[in-house]
Each structure stands twice: as C-alpha cells, then as structure tokens.
Amino acid sequence: MNWDAIGALGEVLGSIAVFVTLGYLAVQLRHARSETRRSISQGRMEANREIIKLELLDLEPRRKVDASLGLEPIPGVAELMNVAELTWEEAYRVFMVEVAAWNYRVWTITNIEDLSPAERQLFDSAIRVKYQRTYG
C-alpha cells in the first residue's frame, strides 16, 4: 500500500465521519426544538395557572367590573348558579378550577409520550374516573 492509497482511505474515512457527525447534529437539533416547544408550552400553562390563582384570591374586583359593564355571567358560571344553586362567587370559583384542571389535562395529553408507564397509568385512570363520574 502506498501513501496515495493511505491518503485516499483517510479522506474516505474523514468524509464518513463528517456525515455521521452531521446526522448526529440533525438529531440533536430536532430534540432541542422539541424541548423548546415543550418548555414554551409548559411556561404558558404555568402562567395561566398563576393568572387563575391570582384572580381567585379576590373575586370582588371581577364582579364589580362585570356589573359595571353590564356583563352576564359566562355560560358555565350561569349554569352552575342555576343548577347547583350556587352564588356567583362559588360558581365562578368552581368554573375556574375546572378551567385550570382542563388546561393541565390538555398539556399532559400533548406530552403523554414523556410520562413513565406508572405516571401514564395514573393519568389514564384519573381521566377515566373524572369523565365517567361527569358524563358516564
């Protein structure tokens, strides 16, 4: 084997290494994009939860604004007031807690592949219990 053959073999091996590295970088880039999207989604969910929590601390300003603008209760709140005979404040609290729970479930469902088998089983059974009780 002469030096030209050894050099050509080195170039071929170098080219293969470059392609392997590019493939690895493409996989890492896809993973990083996925994690960024997941992080943004989680951030939105946490911000939404904080907004709901802040709003539920004191409902009187919300009631005053709605009354001053002549707004009727949102349909879910109005239905809770009529069916369960709740006050506006009680109905609004129940409704907003359900909204927060729904947001959590939606976020979990979009990231379901990341749950461990035990977490997935727990989530599935909680969903089953919730919706069988509500709609079953």
Image (cartoon, rainbow, N blue to C red):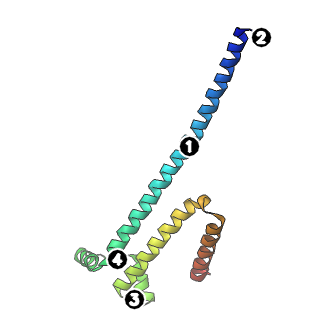
Picture residue at 41% right of the left edge, 75% below the top: 96
Q: Contact, CB < 8 Å: mark 1 with mark 2?
A: no
Pointer 4 residue: 56
User: Residue 19's x, y, as percent?
Assistant: 63, 29
Secondary structure at numbered mark 4: helix
Sort mark 3 into few (<14), some (14-19) or many (20+) by Cα contacts within 10 Å.
some
The correct choice, above or below, for 66 with respect to 116 in the image is below
Amino acid type, callout 2: Met
| Residue toward you, 39 or 7 | 7
To which residue does mark 2 refer? 1
Q: Nearer the viewer, residue 122 or 6?
A: 6
Residue type, mark 1 in image: Arg
Q: Which residue is mark 1?
A: 30
Q: Secondary structure at mark 2?
A: loop
Residue that appears at 37% across and 68% down: 50
Q: Which residue is mark 3?
A: 86
Q: What is the CA distance from the residue labelled 3 to the residue labelled 1?
A: 50 Å
Q: Nearer the viewer, residue 70 or 28?
A: 28
Give SS at disc 1: helix
Relative depth, front residue between 5 and 123 = 5
Q: Bin the neighbour count of mark 4 within 10 Å (Cα to Cα): few under 14, some 14-19, many 20 and up.
A: some
The CA distance from mark 3 to mark 2 is 91 Å
Question: CA separation, marks 4 and 1?
Answer: 39 Å
**Mark 3 or mark 1: whose residue is earlier in sequence:** 1
